[in-house]
Structures are given as C-alpha cells and as structure tokens.
Image (cartoon, rainbow, N blue to C red):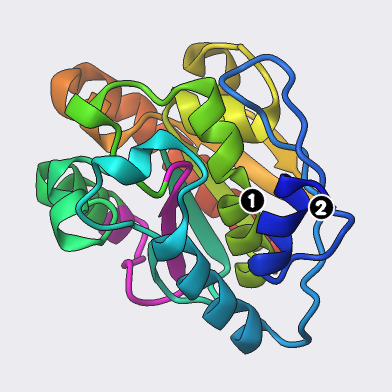
Amino acid sequence: MSRREEILAEMGLGPIWRLRRKGGVGAIEARSTFTEPGAAKGWIQLKQAVPACTACGLHKSRTRTVLGVGDEQAEWMLIGEAPGAEEDRLGEPFVGQAGKLLDNMLAAIDLKRSANVYIANVLKCRPPGNRNPEPEEVEKCSPHLRAQIELVAPKLILAMGRFAAQTLLSTDASIASLRGRLHSHAGVPLIVTYHPAYLLRNLPDKAKAWEDLVLARSTMASLR
C-alpha cells in the first residue's frame, strides 16, 4: 500500500479514490467511497482526520484547521479558497469582513449559513501571509474537500473565487470566462462567482456577483 493509500485509509476512504492534476492549481477528479456506511460515520472520520493531517507543510504554521460550517445535509454548498487569519484563529470559514459580506449575499437570496447552506474551503489550513495556495497543497488537501462534497451531497455548488473554480472544474480559465453559466462537478451543478474578499476590494463587481446569485437561485428552483 502506498503512502497516499495509507492516508486515505486512515481517513476512512475507499480504494477507488483518485486524484487528478490537470491545469489549474491542482484540479481534482472525484471518485470516492467511504468504507463505513452512513454519513454520520463519515463525518466523524473526517472531523478526526483534518485536525490530524500533516500531508503538506501548512500544518507547521496553522493555529487551527478549518473544516467547514453549516448544515451538513444542505442543498447549497459554498466553496472558497483557504482560511485567512481570523479563520485560522477561530476555526471557522468566512469570518471577518468577507464573512459579513457573504452573510449579506446569502440573506439577499433568503439563505443563511446555519440553514440549508454548508460552507467550506479548498484548503483547510491557512497559507502563511494569506498567500495563494500552491498546487501541492491543493492536491494534498483535495481528499478532505471531496469527502465533504460526498457527505453533504448538495444539489448545487457555488465556487467562490479563482482557486475554487479552477480546482473544481479542472481548468486554468479566468473567473470572468467561467461565471454567468452553469457548470458541473461530479454530476453536481456548479456556478462560479467572485470571492467575497475580492468584492471588498472591487466594489463594482458586486453587481456581477448578484447576477451569479440570481442564476444560482433560479438553478436551484429548477432542481426542485
């Protein structure tokens, strides 16, 4: 058994899990199976595996791992890039000013993070200085994200920011070229939008983000 297989086995993931790097920052191709039946068992395994993970160098500088927050059986799954300083301190994704903006964006379409929404990041540890994730870090952390997607089993994924979109869609394309239309990841409809932290620095693009939310809302309505 290879070291990767040993790590996946420790996480409770079956042998058909495969990772693929193709363009982007370490794109992932999903095919996974939990060896233990039931989502509850899978969540227990994942919540134990992430804090213990030392697969990449980020474990050396983190304060806390940041798995995710929200409804673990949500129809909506929002995926961002990586924890920042406040997320690293508190162990929760999207806090601080970006988190407040995200909460306001959700409220605008009658959603909130505690009900029917699950929020996660591509990386579970903060890159030092909030630098961009490196390809190896994305690759090493991808099993955790794939496990979350499988366990939540959302009806719709909202990829927020370049790294989330490129990772989930196996592409190097820009946000501008990806947003405004429907994509798919592992059979789940996916919509691309800007990261809230980006919107705080580029206020005019808030209007475009609203268009993305309207598309997401109409897509979800069509799935019910």
Out of 192 and 216, give the one closest to the viewer.
192
Whether residue 208 appears in magenta in the rendering, the answer is no
Q: Residue at x 58, y 77 (%)?
A: 45
* Residue matched to label 1: 143
Instruction: Report the side of 168 relative to 64 (left or right).
Output: right
Residue 205 vertical placement versus 141 (above, below)? above
**Total marks in image:** 2
Instruction: Report the side of 159 relative to 95 (left or right).
Output: right
Q: Are marks 1 and 2 in contact (CB under 8 Å)?
A: yes
Kindly tell me whether residue 82 is visible in this rendering: no
Measured as percent of width and height from the top left, residue 206 is found at: 26, 28
Q: Residue 203 sits in which quadrant?
A: top left
Measured as percent of width and height from the top left, residue 127 is found at: 30, 32
Q: Residue furthest right?
A: 16
Q: Amino acid at mark 1?
A: Pro
Residue extent of the magenta highlight? 106-123
Residue 175 vertical placement versus 145 (above, below)? above
Describe the element under mark 2 as helix, strand or loop: loop
Ranked by sequence position, the earlier of labels 1 and 2 is 2
C-alpha distance separating marks 1 and 2: 8 Å
Instruction: Report the side of 128 relative to 169 (left or right).
Output: left
Q: Quadrant where the C terminus lies?
A: bottom right
Out of 173 and 56, give the one closest to the viewer.
56
Q: Residue 24 sits in which quadrant?
A: top right
Disc 1 crowd rating (10 Å Cα; few below 14, some 14-19, many 20+) is many
Q: Residue at x 44, y 67 (%)?
A: 117
* Residue matched to label 2: 17
Measured as percent of width and height from the top left, residue 166 is found at: 58, 24
Q: Amino acid at mark 2?
A: Trp
Describe the element under mark 1 as helix, strand or loop: helix
Kindly tell me whether residue 128 is visible in this rendering: yes
Q: Residue at x 14, y 42 (%)?
A: 85
